[in-house]
Image (cartoon, rainbow, N blue to C red):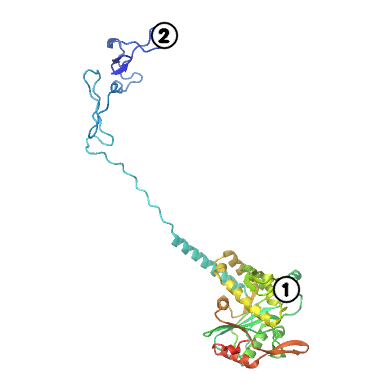
Amino acid sequence: MNRDGGGYRPAGQRPPGPPSGAPSSGPPPYLPPAQRRPPRSAGQRGGPADGRPRRTAILPPPGAERPRGAGHPPAWGHAAGQGYPPAQSYPPPGRGSGRSGPPRPPTARPTRPSRPPRWGRRLKVLVVLLAALLLGGGIYVDSQVTRVAALADYDGRPDSSGTNWLIVGSDSRADLTQQQEATLSTGNAAGQRTDTVMLLHTGSAGTTLVSLPRDSLLSIPGHGRNKLNSAYSFGGPKLLTRTVEQATGLRIDHYAEIGFDGFVNVVDAVGGVDMCIPEAMKDPKAGLNVKAGCQRLDGQTALGYVRTRATPRADLDRVQHQREFLSALMKQVASPWTVLNPFRLVGLVRAMPGALTVDSSDHLWNLVGLALAMHRLSGGSGVTTTVPIGGFSTVNGSSVLRWDNTRAKQLFGALEKDQQVPKSALG
């Protein structure tokens, strides 16, 4: 029964509306059961389709408390004198009909475990890409580098142990424009000579780098006695190689030459080279103006540094600067900061073909061996020296440098047998 005003009425009945003309406000009057409207039948508006009366919620009496106990609490039952029928009982939530026992806990959907990041696979892909880049760049450099027949083939050519490189810095201006000559302060001298001549020996006794001053007075095959750099202008790399072989008794196995423009491009491609300058140096002829202290030299400044002779010992200081800078440059080329940096590596690969000239039998792997040998020298593993000097003199109005033949024979004799150079033979 539903409570309506001050009494109760059966479920499904409602009191009639107020009589005509009566006010619409206030609670409806109480009607006896006989005057109440019967429940709607099937098919009437709002009723169920099977004709059953609409179910009406059964509310507990005012002030009643819901009993609590073990298991499912009992449904509200009929209490004597309260005037409402007992409510139906339903199975507790979570139980199906005909099943007993405590409610089943909710089952969580299985979730797929997150995959850990596959750093190993990513590292392998990176290594493969880097190897492909290095291989592709190496093939490109090897195919584009300039080659000349630099090794002379003549009767009585000397034979020696170990491996010997002849490293040459050319002063040719043939590939420079007028603007580049002015910018690099190279001048416009005609012809082609050598600003730098160095002999690099590698073998079981270690690595030795020997500077051969360009003003050294030597016998040049077919041209008498003259300065060493004149051999290059007379007969190019082949005559220069033969002159060095006859003067030292060493067989030259590899040849590498770099020009002014190529030198600047390589230095700039690796981001410059760090050098510690003991004293401030200024030479307008070489375009050099640097302060004392450790600093990074760009290509233009580095070229002036290795060319200047505006120092107390002139050409002897110059060859020392060349050895020091070449070692630092090769260290920078072989460093991980260059090899693993794609911008520097690509720039170096683009600069190398136009910068280097090698013998027709030399390839990229030979240049890699040269770079590693120079890298060892920059780390203090090896010997760097100048051929022993006996004095200076003047020939045909030009200043020349004479070797100390006794000590020079000791130096080159040790290298010929791939032995440790005695300290007394160092220049």
- Say which quarter of the image contains residue 234: bottom right
Q: Tell me whether circle 1 and circle 2 mark residues in contact (CB < 8 Å).
A: no
Q: Quadrant of the N terminus?
A: top left
Q: Secondary structure at mark 2?
A: loop
Left or right side of 202 for 183? right
Query: Disc 1 marks which amino acid?
Result: Lys
Which residue position is annotated with label 1? 282
> In the picture shown, does residue 24 fall above or below 421?
above
In the rendered image, which quarter is residue 169 located in? bottom right
Can the viewer see residue 11 in this picture? no
**CA distance separating discs 1 and 2:** 117 Å
Q: How many marks?
A: 2
**Residue annotated with mark 2:** 23
Q: Nearer the viewer, residue 9 or 60?
A: 60
Q: Nearer the viewer, mark 1 or mark 2?
A: 1
Quarter of image, res 301: bottom right
Amino acid type of the residue that numbered disc 2 sits on in the rendered structure: Pro
Count residues near mark 1 (Cα–Cα under 10 Å), then give few for <14, some for 14-19, many for 20+.
Answer: some
Residue ID at (56%, 65%):
341
Q: Residue 254 placed where, x, y %?
A: 59, 82
